Image (cartoon, grey):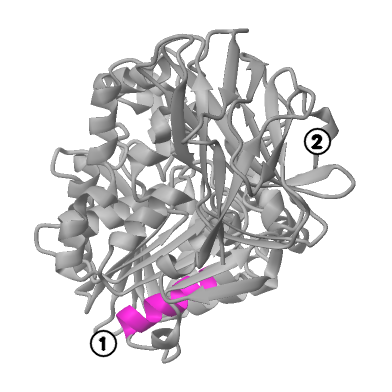
């Protein structure tokens, strides 16, 4: 008799499930937890009958058994208009009673739709037909001897369109298939990450307007803002995504997209890049979404490194449909990742499904009483605040003026009185200990797990940055901070990165928020006033803690438009004195 290992399926243990729950979905910034992917593969194998029950824990086996008793399972290939074949997975509930279908475009991972098999089982038991599919080009692909490639079963054909028009058309084709296969009473889309953006775009563009609700987890609204915000290219995020498709770049992207990616890396033809990202932004099509009245659920994180929160907030604010926004501690997919993959308590997913039940199944009487916005406070996971709109989060603004250091040096002050005539200079081209994250995804995942990064501010090398510190005092930071200062660039362009920290009496700090800004079209040596928003935050400072503002010239997440080892100067001009606007609530 063959063992599960002989069939290529790794048995799932209770220890593995516990490991995913405790550690999270991400093994690194470009790698899904092997335990999480193993769970999805084992669930699918058991559900489809290609593996014996002993590959699952008793809890998961009971879940599979219940679904198999009430539904039939399919693994179709859906042919797109241009002939591309999309890998898909269906769970069709038995009986003639009209049921809604939830369509789930997979996220941007090499595993395609398989990773969230646990979610599909949960949806089926809640009374939904399920149709999951992998967007074109996404999924594992392997080179074969002599040339060519072979795709994994959950990999879709074609090349990645990055939520472009081909993906919109594919979504409508998938809806066609769902109508033929399920004859559903209603149609909802639920997506995480890449799948969430595709969900919004399909809902806005489906010619027949057939999407009745959208759940968008770890989502984006404005891809231009996410990847080129403040004229600064988010290089680390894009490089991580390119490596996360499941195959080599030349296989996964067509020539036109590869050229756009290279232009993005090189900082050339950026107007064309912006036009390309704008076309792929749900925010660009809110007129259609609002006209169709599509109920939309948003979820995002404060320290999101792939799709920073401000773009999602701006899009959410412009929606006039029934809507809800959850904001969480951490980074991309950290809050909901485990709830999509393994059993166990997970409020982010539970609330998303309750909202879906209300708007699609007509259940959940408590949902209409929910506030429009609920947000966790960093780093107090048990504290969630409710607001009837994002505009209510900030109730006042504290302006703190940047002052020069006493006796020279780089350590300035944040105070209540305007201060002009000072200047702080530092050298470009060097990474510092003041950084947004140690690693994409995983630093924020640790925040979600209750272990935010602690910074030793004594290691902040003042040769390469400048700092300003406020007096101690309790503060409730709520909203989008903004920095204004005078910059003297060393060339025609310059990049600054501002970080806001919570400084403890012992000299350690935790990050509140940050954001880069790149000045273009400047003249070397000529002072220019610059202002930019940092990413939104919800953070409480204790009474004996101080606000620490740090500005440097380089962070590993972003492009750097400074000459190497040049001198940048920041200062304050009379009449437009340097300041930090701190939102409070």
Which residue appears at 38% of the width and 17% of the height? 267
Outermost residue to the left: 208
| SS of the residue under disc 1 | loop
Question: In this view of the protein, which residue sits in the foreground, 202 or 57?
Answer: 202
Query: In which quarter of the view is residue 31 placed?
Result: top right
Whether residue 68 appears in this view of the structure is no
Query: Which secondary structure is most common in the magenta stretch?
Result: helix
Question: In this view of the protein, which residue sits in the foreground, 546 or 106?
Answer: 546
Question: Is residue 336 shown left or right of residue 575?
Answer: right
Q: Is residue 356 magenta?
A: yes
Q: Is residue 295 magenta?
A: no
Q: Is residue 354 above or below residue 443?
A: below
Which residue appears at 20% of the width and 52% of the height? 285
- Please identify, in this view, whether the residue under mark 2 or under mark 1 is nearer the observer: 2
Q: Position of residue 353 (x, y in %)?
A: 45, 74
Dot 2 corresponds to which residue? 457
Q: CA distance from mark 2 to mark 1?
A: 63 Å
Outermost residue to the bottom: 365
Query: In which quarter of the view is residue 523 placed?
Result: top left
Question: In this view of the protein, which residue sits in the foreground, 409 or 219?
Answer: 409
Which residues, given as a range, are shown in magenta?
349-361
Q: Is residue 455 above or below residue 399?
A: above
Question: Is residue 322 shown left or right of residue 387?
Answer: left
Please say if the residues under marks 2 and 1 sit with CB atoms less than 8 Å apart.
Answer: no
Q: Position of residue 449 (x, y in %)?
A: 72, 57
Q: Position of residue 322 (x, y in %)?
A: 30, 75
Whether residue 481 appears in this view of the structure is yes
| SS of the residue under disc 2 | helix
Assign the C terminus to one quadrant of the image: bottom right
Question: Is residue 406 shown left or right of residue 5?
Answer: right
Dot 1 corresponds to which residue? 97
Which residue appears at 19% of the width and 74% of the height? 183
């Amino acid at each position: 008799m063959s063992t599960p290992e002989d069939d290529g399926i790794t048995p799932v243990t209770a220890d593995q499930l516990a490991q995913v729950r405790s550690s999270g979905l991400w093994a690194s910034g470009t790698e899904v937890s092997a335990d999480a992917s193993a769970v999805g593969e084992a669930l699918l194998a058991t559900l489809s009958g290609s593996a014996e029950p002993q590959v699952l824990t008793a809890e998961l086996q009971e879940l599979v058994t219940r679904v198999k008793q009430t539904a039939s399972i399919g693994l179709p290939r859906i042919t797109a208009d241009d002939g591309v074949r999309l890998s898909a997975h269906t769970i069709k509930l038995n009986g003639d009673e009209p049921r809604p279908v939830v369509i789930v475009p997979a996220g941007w991972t090499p595993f395609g739709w398989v990773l969230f098999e646990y979610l599909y089982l949960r949806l089926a038991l809640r009374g939904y037909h399920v149709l999951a599919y992998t967007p074109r080009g996404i999924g594992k692909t392997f080179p074969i001897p002599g040339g060519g490639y072979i795709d994994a079963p959950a990999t879709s054909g074609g090349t990645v369109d990055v939520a472009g028009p081909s993906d919109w058309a594919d979504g409508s084709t998938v809806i066609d298939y769902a109508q033929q296969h399920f004859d559903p009473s209603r149609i909802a889309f639920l997506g995480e990450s890449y799948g969430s953006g595709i969900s919004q775009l399909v809902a806005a563009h489906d010619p027949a307007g057939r999407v009745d609700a959208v759940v968008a987890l770890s989502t984006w609204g404005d891809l231009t803002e996410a990847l080129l915000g403040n004229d600064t290219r988010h290089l680390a995020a894009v490089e991580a995504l390119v490596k996360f498709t499941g195959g080599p770049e030349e296989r996964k992207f067509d020539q036109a997209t590869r050229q756009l990616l290279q232009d993005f890396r090189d900082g050339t033809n950026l107007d064309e890049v912006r036009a390309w990202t704008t076309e792929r932004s749900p925010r660009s099509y809110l007129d259609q979404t609002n006209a169709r009245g599509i109920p939309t659920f948003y979820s995002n994180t404060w320290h999101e490194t792939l799709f920073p929160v401000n773009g999602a907030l701006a899009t959410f604010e412009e929606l006039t449909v029934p809507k809800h926004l959850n904001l969480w501690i951490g980074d991309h997919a950290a809050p909901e990742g485990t709830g999509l993959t393994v059993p166990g308590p997970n409020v982010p997913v539970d609330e998303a499904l309750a909202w879906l039940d209300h708007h699609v199944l007509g259940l959940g009487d408590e949902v209409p009483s929910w506030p429009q916005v609920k947000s966790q406070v960093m780093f107090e996971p048990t504290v969630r605040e409710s607001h009837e709109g994002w505009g209510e989060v900030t109730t006042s603004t504290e302006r703190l003026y940047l002052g020069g250091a006493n006796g020279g040096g780089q350590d300035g002050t944040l105070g209540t009185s305007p201060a002009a005539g000072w200047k702080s200079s530092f050298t470009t081209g060097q990474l510092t200990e003041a950084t947004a994250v140690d690693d994409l995804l995983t630093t924020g995942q640790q925040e979600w797990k209750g272990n935010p990064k602690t910074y030793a501010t004594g290691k902040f090398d003042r040769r390469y940055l400048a700092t300003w510190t406020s007096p101690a005092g309790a503060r409730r930071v709520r909203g989008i901070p903004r920095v204004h200062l005078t910059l003297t660039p060393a060339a025609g362009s310059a990049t600054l990165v501002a970080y806001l920290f919570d400084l403890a009496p012992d000299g350690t700090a935790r990050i509140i928020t940050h954001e880069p800004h790149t000045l273009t079209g400047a003249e070397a040596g000529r002072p220019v006033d610059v202002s930019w928003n940092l990413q939104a935050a919800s953070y409480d400072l204790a009474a004996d803690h101080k606000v620490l503002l740090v500005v440097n010239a380089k962070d590993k997440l972003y492009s750097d438009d400074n000459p190497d080892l040049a001198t940048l100067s920041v200062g304050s001009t009379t009449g437009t004195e340097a300041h930090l606007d701190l939102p409070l609530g």
